[in-house]
Image: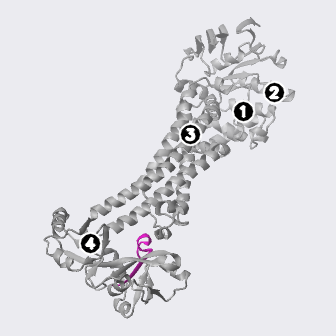
Amino acid sequence: MLVKLHFALLLLLRYKKKHIATFSLLTLLIALISSVVFISSSLQQDIYQTLDAQADITLQKYRAGRVEDAPASWVDEVLEIEGVSNAQGRIYGMHFYEPLEEYFMVVGVDFYDEQIEKSLQKVVENLDVERFLERKNMLIGSDVKRFFDEYEYDEYYIFRPPDRSREKVYIYAELDEMSSVVSGNLVLMSQEEARTILGVDDEFVSDIVLSVPNKDEIDTIVNKLKMMHFDMRIITKKRIENYYKDLFNYKGGLFLSLYIVVILSFMLILYQRYSLAKSVELKEVALLRLSGWRIDEVIWLKLFENFVVIVSAFMSGVIVAFVFVYSFGGGFLKRVFLGSENLLSNATLSPVIDTQTLFGIFLFFTLPYLVTIVVPLWRESVRDSMEILR
Amino acid sequence: MIELKNITKEYKGEVILKDINLSIKKGEVVVIKGESGSGKSTLLNILALLAQPTSGEVLVEGENVALLSDYHSSLYRKDFVGYITQEYYLFENLSVYENLLAPLVIQNLSFDEIDKRIEEKLHLANIAKKKNSQVAHLSGGEKQRVVIAKALLNNPKVVLCDEPTANLDDKNANFFLALLEELQTKGVTILIVTHDKRLESLKFVSRYYEMSFGEIITQS
């Protein structure tokens, strides 16, 4: 067995020119597909983490097709509904950063609330809340920090609330612990400060989030909520999940064209290998048959030889994709996913390896490749060896 | 030991061999002469089980081997017969040593045994000095000697030679003929097809045949 492996590798090395073009093209195609898989897996993980932290039901006030601040009194009203364990009014909104014409997400946080959202729990745990609240402070996401740095807002930034006053808020720390896709454009501060900057009056909140421990009761609670106020917009966690799924399907459609290009290129490689198998490789088979090799022994050798090529190409492709996505940020592919105008496109992707999909890609490339080589060799090798050699 | 009975071979409607009958005993050396295209090489291919006759029997030690399965015909080539081909059927990108490795890979030998066997045959074919040279860089005569060494690797009981001296100079041709004589003394059966005049009156040859247009026309 060792001698056979030694000989197979010897043939592979001595006839490497024959495999180099195939290897390079396959590596490129596999790298392209794997990059898409890596980016999509990372984004999906980030989004699922976000979804996981979402409230079971979110309530907004709707007027003339627009969302506006909801009355804070709704919080007490919805707490009366059986099955609702908690209800909180949230203060948040977008702030326009004029120097770079970007938007930040300003979120007001009640740092003493024990029912604080899961996604913020970690931030609060690591924060000296008393010290933080001593003056007007804020925690900023990595993208926000980068944009502030660009205009040398190292210590503080002066917000311009809707009433055009000036609100100086100090930069307390960077939010680097959380997932960067979610927190990249986030600015956290006290609820009072957020109200001032966003212009939300004390009797109002941006929206209200409800906790429903028994998921089977959600539909019933939604029906009760619908009866309460005609202008109440009810968003369930399931609806948000469906929204993200739709978004991913849309992006999936975009990448369908990329997949088609990859498949067509792969078919061209297969055709080239098929032609090579019927000419050059068939002669090698005949040479070995002349020396007493059986058909199955020759096919095994050719299978091994080409398996090494395809596995090396697969591994190289995956490594190239991994480095491209997680060390170099995924370049143009990430921009296709997130949009170049989106602030989130500057977010760093956290490494996620979707082994199941990668295994699928491995099979997709390996099986047709090996079949394309072995089948013609098997069919032709039963011919007289001398006839083939001539 | 080897008996060909009424062997006929047709290829694409053309008759290549016509009703060939031939008998060779163990340890005999038989030379078949004839012009190019007379069917000599096809006859050797049939004996090496690299081509099948259209009709007739190839009896080796009493058994008809003409229609053996792939498994058994490969076994026959691996263990029983050595074939010195006229063309240099070698891996051009491999070295001489690596080319000789190819038939031994399937012999279940250790690396040491393989090394020993290759060294021995390289000396026998007078090509040991070129052991590590790439075949593509060898001259015609050197390649021919590699083919000879390769054919003898499995210590065959029957050696089939197709124009074995065609690319050899006088010195190497004589060296090769001495090698054949030595093999004969060890009981190896040898069948040579050639039109090289240097092989016309050799003492150790048992019989000469002449072929023309697929038929044996004379025996001496």
Q: Which of the chains bears the disc numbered 1?
A: B
Quarter holding the C terminus of chain A?
top right
Q: Is residue B101 above or below residue B158?
A: below
Task: Kindly indicate the quadrant of the structure image that contains residue A152.
Answer: bottom right
Which residue is the site of mark 1? B149
Per the image, the residue denoted by label 3 is A270
> Alpha carbon of mark 4 to alpha carbon of mark 1: how far?
93 Å
Which of pointers 4 and 2 indicates the residue nearer the eye? 4
Question: Which label's residue is closer to the chain start, 2 or 1?
Answer: 1
In this view, the mark in front (4 or 1) = 4
Q: Is residue A188 left or right of residue B28?
A: left
- In the rendered structure, find residue A3 and report the number of the disc placed on it: none
B179 falls in the magenta region: no
Residue A363 horizontal/vertical position (percent): 46, 46
Mark 3 touching mark 2, by CB under 8 A? no
Which residue, given by chain and number where applicable, does mark 2 sit on?
A: B167
| Residue A7 percent coordinates (x, y) | 61, 42
Which region is colored magenta?
A176-190
Q: Could you tell me the amino acid type at mark 2? A: Asn
- Furthest toward the right, the residue is B170
Q: Chain of mark 4?
A: A
Protein chain holding label 3: A
- The amino acid on which the numbered mark 1 sits, given as a three-letter code, is Ala
Q: Is residue A208 visible?
A: yes
The residue at which mark 4 appears reads as A61
- Tell me the amino acid under the disc marked 4: Lys
